[in-house]
Amino acid sequence: MLSLAQITQLCLFSVLLAAGNIFFKLTALNSPPLNSIQGLMTLPLNPWFWGALVLYGIATVIWTITLQNVALSIAYPFAALGFVFVPLASYVIFKEPINLQYIIGVVLILVALKLITAGK
């Protein structure tokens, strides 16, 4: 059975990756077209880009610490929480739509996580 600390670490990992994805979207919205060297050269000037990298870096450290005590086969499905967090954040921040299929998918992901972690 996963401890509360392990579940917290796994959820924090997923939240940080989701936040990083939101920051990457903000990077994309606040950058010139990145299909040229000139466009790519502007990335280091974009604070959203650096924020995303920092969030991903912290998530990587938390992930590595977590994997010292949790089997990868149990930990990895928590990455699917990104499919829950990112669209919800996109709905709130960017006003992107959420439909019934999304809600059903979220429920299925949460049920799957419960099944995977039950009794472990």
Image (tube, grey):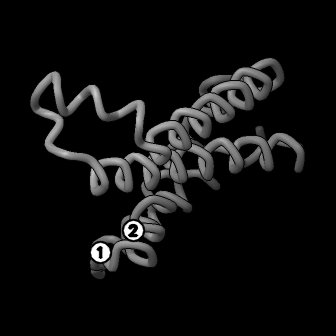
Relative image position of residue 46 (x, y in whole percent) = 41, 42
Q: Secondary structure at mark 1?
A: loop
Question: Does the rendering let one see residue 1?
Answer: no
Q: Residue at x 17, y 36 (%)?
A: 34
Pointer 1 residue = 96
On screen, residue 117 above or below 63: below
- As displayed, is residue 88 above or below residue 61? below
Disc 2 to disc 1: CB gap under 8 Å = yes
Give 103 or 58, whichever is nearer the viewer: 58
Q: Position of residue 67 (x, y in %)?
A: 73, 22
- The C terminus - image quarter: top right
Disc 2 versus disc 1: distance between alpha carbons? 6 Å
> Is tag 2's residue or tag 1's residue first in the polypeptide sequence?
2
Look at 19% across and 33% down and name the residue there: 39
SS under mark 2: helix
Q: Nearer the viewer, residue 83 or 28?
A: 28
Residue 53's disc number: none
Q: Quadrant of residue 74?
A: top right
The tag on residue 90 is 2
Whether 20 is drawn above or below 39: the answer is below
Q: Is residue 56 left or right of residue 34?
A: right
Count how many numbered circles sit on residues in the image.
2
Of the residues shown, which amino acid type is indicated by label 2?
Ser
* Residue 86 position within the rendered picture, expressed as x and y whole percent measured from the top left: 44, 59
Viewer-side residue, 4 vs 57: 57
35 sits to left or right of 60: left
Residue shown at 54% from the left, 53% from the top: 19
For label 2, count other residues whose C-alpha is less than 10 Å away and answer few (under 14), some (14-19) or many (20+). Answer: some
Q: Amino acid at mark 1?
A: Glu
The x and y percentages for residue 8 are 80, 49
